[in-house]
Amino acid sequence: MNEKDIIDRCRSGQNGMCDLLIERHKTALYSFCRKLEYRKADADDLFQDTWVKAVKNLHMYDGRARFLTWLFTICINLHRDRLRRHFRWSKILKSYHSGDQMETDMADLESKEKRPRETAAEDRRADRLKDALQGLKEKLRLPIILHYYREFSLREISGMLGIPAGTVKSRLSNGRKQLKKILEKDQ
Amino acid sequence: MKENELDILLEQYCRQEITPPPQLTKAVKLRLKTDPLPVALLPVSLFFNALVMLLSLVVFFDPALSIMQKFALYFAGSILFNSLMVLVLLKPERLNAFFRQLTLGMTENANLHGLTK
């Protein structure tokens, strides 16, 4: 059964079709979520929220782009919402608390920003790269992940991020340069 | 570090496929079955509760009933109408999924507190 058939049947509410759609794309989406979010728990939440939003809005998928591209766009938008919420909270905490209390609360929040290592067994080089990627600004990090993960074209990345293709190209190049600098500094 | 060395590192890291844990996929499927529930129920729930309010107004002006009896009748009517609505409107598989998720959540909480070991 091809993807279009599955999507149409899922839209019409046929039993098990949405489950089939999830099974087909779960690994691709989960791997992407794990690259966007440093912490596993955050990636799990993002994965769940993306599927719920995608299936609820399946009637809006027009088939012009690949389904995976559409799914990743939803995932990126949700990830940005989460970041915005997180940023807003950190601002509220900064203005609300003072002194020792603020330091404790900020330490909690910053531990999320720094995103500590969760699996000690991870390869050291991959770990360093992961940390270096987290050190990049979001606008530089996203094009890099999308470009290397699934070899999305510049046009596809520009559609997903809502920016011109030329900007994607320059952000890719700037991101690579900064990443190189961070990695060389660590050595 | 050479340019292609960085490219290789990035390719290795970014193309690494990670399979989601089975319980996560299961949770997504359950959420999809239970998520549309509150939104679909809201207008119907409002209608039924308005009906209960209307009936309670009739009861409210009955001089033969005490205040406690009026309250008891209102609550009994409200519970009855809302239960009826849930039973009549929900498909059995949705109800089933809803209770499964409820018990799953309770088990997870119990696991967190070490109650099931």
Image (cartoon, coloured by chain):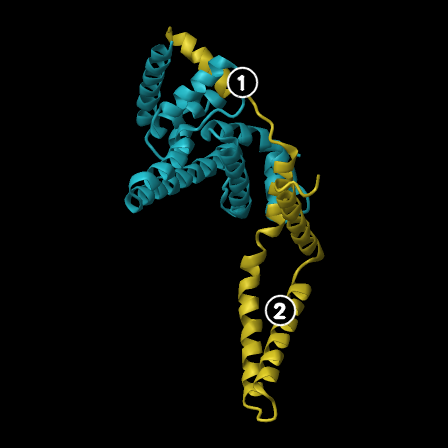
Chain colours: A cyan, B yellow
Residue drawn 66% across the image and 60% down it: B90
The residue furthest bottom is: B63
Q: Residue at x 53, y 69 (%)?
A: B46
Q: Given this view, does label 1 or label 2 mark the residue nearer the observer?
A: 1
Position of residue B87 measured from the top left corner of the image (x, y, whole percent): 68, 64
Quarter of the image containing the N terminus of chain A? Answer: top right
Q: Mark 2 lies on which chain?
A: B
Residue A30 picture quarter? top right
Instruction: Give the residue at x 59% y 82%.
Output: B68
- Which residue shows up at 57% across the image and 93% down it? B63
Mark-to-mark CA distance, 1 and 2? 52 Å
Q: Name the residue under label 2.
A: B82
What kind of residue is marked 2? Asn
Closest to the observer, A81 or A100 = A100
Q: In this orientation, does residue A18 appear?
A: no
Q: Is mark 2 on a helix, strand or loop?
A: helix
Q: In this view, does A144 lie above or below B73?
A: above
Where in the figure is residue A18, as x and y percent of width and height? 62, 42
- The residue at the far top in this view is B2
Q: Where is residue A169 in the image (x, y as percent from the top left)?
A: 33, 22
Crowding at dot 2, Cα within 10 Å, few <14 / some 14-19 / many 20+, comes out as some
Q: Mark 1 lies on which chain?
A: A
Mark 1, other Cα within 10 Å: few <14 / some 14–19 / many ≥20:
few
Type of the residue with mark 1: Glu
Question: Which of the labelled discs sits on residue A122, or is there none?
Answer: 1
